[in-house]
Image (cartoon, rainbow, N blue to C red):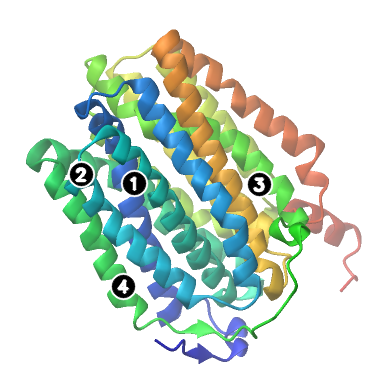
Amino acid sequence: METKHVNSSRKESGLWSKDFLFVILINFLIFVNHVMTLSTFPFYIQSLGGSEALAGLTATLFSLIAVIFRPFIGLSLNRGKRKILLLIGIVGMALIPMGYLAVPVLSVAFVFRMAHGAALSFSNTTSSTIATDIVPRKRFAEGMGMFGVSTAFASACAPALGLALMYGLGYSALFAAETGCMVIAFLLFLFLKTPEIPARKVPFNVQQLIDKDALPASVIMFVFLLTFGALENFIALFASKNNLPSGGIFFTIMAVMLFVTRATVGKVADRNGEGVFVYSCNASMFAAFLLLAFAPNTVTFLLAAVLAGYGFGGLEPALQSMAVHIAPPERRGSANSTFLCAYDIGWGLGGGIAGYLISSLGYSPMFAILSLANIVSVLLYVVWGRKHPSSFSYAIRNQRKNPTAA
């Protein structure tokens, strides 16, 4: 299938276009597939005879494979490849849920889960890079914030959908729905046109795998995601074992907060910088974890969902915009893969640490210990991130000091 291109002058046009909408919808479906599996996989592992620690290990292995693949995918994207890599990811994410269903064996589930991590690497590294190609430079944070709505909304509503399918119809319906999402994504893919990025033949260089300018935002996000990885993997089990409202209700409330937050975060970041979100979103997630650790009841559980929704909903698009916005077209693939590698490591390590802490200490100590990650995330921003040229806040401060500069 040939890739159709559109002229790069589209960057100067308005934010909303048919192709921007298509890539948002494709990314949403990618993450519905991913997050429906994510929220239900601990139950699936237990149904095969595994423990919570093993469920945490699958999260870590999933992320490890994703991290291994992403830098090389980013390098291929730097060389101008876009749609073929997205197609590989979509097809992989369509087939793997059928593998879970066809061979319900614990050891095989680990293998398929790692393959799922590779497929996610192909699909969402590429969809993010295509979005950065399409979004106008002057509205970059706003555009990436709206693109991030797809990720965040899927991260919030897909767990509720996955749990409802699992409880109501079983794993067959769950995994079939995941495959169905990718069939729809493939149909949208057929109509997606990507901006023309000249093919570049660049000799392999290890230094090209990581974009240095993306590191501050990536590391800050990595530390923050230790908390969100624990929530995504274990909040449903925590609720079921503590007679709290279901994990589906928690994620539904998160979905509302994520949508509200993502609809406004980009304009604020373009105007005032990402700092307001680094401080407020870490504080919000910190408060959510303390409520879950020390005062778990129905009211605090629902309040924690609101706080977590704002925390993740505001921070992720602000920092992804920070990681990518100064990268030229030939480095956007590496910038996106660097950020998403940190995302994978933080989420996967958070799930693995949470599983170990739950098995050895229990849920309350786990929430209390992992809440410290929010403090570390803020400290990293203060001493490193806000002083780095990739920071919107840094650029805004310099512009205010020297308004006549170009």
Amino acid bearing label 4: Phe
Camera sees residue 56? yes
Lower sequence index among marks 2 and 4: 2
Lower sequence index among marks 4 and 3: 4
Amino acid bearing label 3: Ser
- How packed is label 4: few (under 14 Cα within 10 Å), some, or many (20 or more)? some
Determine the CA span between mark 2 and mark 1.
Answer: 10 Å
Determine the CA span between mark 4 and mark 3.
Answer: 29 Å
Q: Which residue is mark 3?
A: 218
Q: Residue at x 61, y 87 (%)?
A: 8
Q: Residue at x 56, y 48 (%)?
A: 67
Lower sequence index among marks 2 and 1: 2
Determine the CA span between mark 4 and mark 1.
Answer: 21 Å
Q: Which residue is mark 2?
A: 103
In what element is the residue under mark 4?
helix
Which label belongs to residue 112? 1
Q: Residue at x 34, y 58 (%)?
A: 93
Amino acid bearing label 2: Val
Determine the CA span between mark 2 and mark 4.
Answer: 25 Å
Q: Which quadrant of the figure contains the N terminus?
A: bottom left
In the image: residue 369, left or right of residue 322: left
Image x and y of residue 147, in percent: 47, 63
Image x and y of residue 356, in percent: 46, 18
Question: Which is nearer the eye, 310 or 225?
Answer: 225
Lower sequence index among marks 3 and 2: 2
In what element is the residue under mark 1?
helix
Question: Which is nearer the eye, 272 or 351?
Answer: 351
Q: Which quadrant of the figure contains the C terminus?
A: bottom right
In the image: residue 319, left or right of residue 119: right
Q: Which residue is mark 4?
A: 186
In the image: residue 360, left or right of residue 252: right
Against 307, residue 384 (above or below) is below
